[in-house]
Image: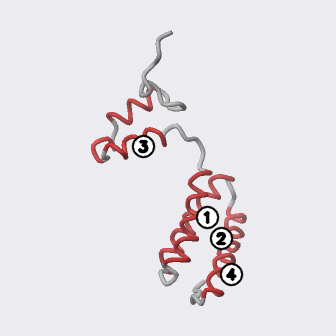
Amino acid sequence: MTERPATSRIKGVSRGRRNSAKSGLYHKALDEAEKLDFELAQGVEGIDDEIALLRLKIKSLIETRPENIKLITEVTDALARLVMTRYKMGSAHKKALTNAIGGVLKDLAVPLGIKYLP
């Protein structure tokens, strides 16, 4: 039985997507490692990983750069938008989610001695 080379097919990435990664809009702007990551990322469906990543980044920002309220707020807003997209929420749910995330942020910031600006 003939063995296929390991690079012949990336699981979950269609041939069309692999080709777009090789000749698409972003191809020239990426280094070799980024091209491989980009190709792998094209096989991921949904935004659950991005939501989890943003949650980790918010936690890290609060721990390492608690004074940068603007950045923490921007990342928190991005998280809220992703969650709304994920669950296709209406405007009423959007406000509730934004308030809930703000509450969590306040609950984290105050014990750390960070001045919370709603």
Q: Residues within 10 Å of mark 1 (few under 14, many from 20)?
A: many
Q: Earlier in the sequence, mark 2 or mark 1?
A: 1
Please provide percent x and percent y for residue 116. Answer: 59, 86
Camera-side residue of 17 and 98:
17
Q: Residues within 10 Å of mark 3 (few under 14, many from 20)?
A: some
Gap between marks 3 and 4 measured at Cα: 36 Å
Gap between marks 3 and 1 measured at Cα: 24 Å
Q: Which residue is mark 2?
A: 98
The amino acid at mark 3 is Phe
Helix, strand or loop under label 3: helix
Residue located at (64% from left, 87% from top) = 110
Residue 107 circle label: 4
Q: Earlier in the sequence, mark 3 or mark 1?
A: 3
Above or below, 100 against 5 in this view is: below
Q: Which residue is mark 3?
A: 38
Residue 71 lies left or right of residue 113; in this view the side is left
Above or below, 71 against 32 in this view is: below
Please provide percent x and percent y for residue 98. Answer: 65, 70
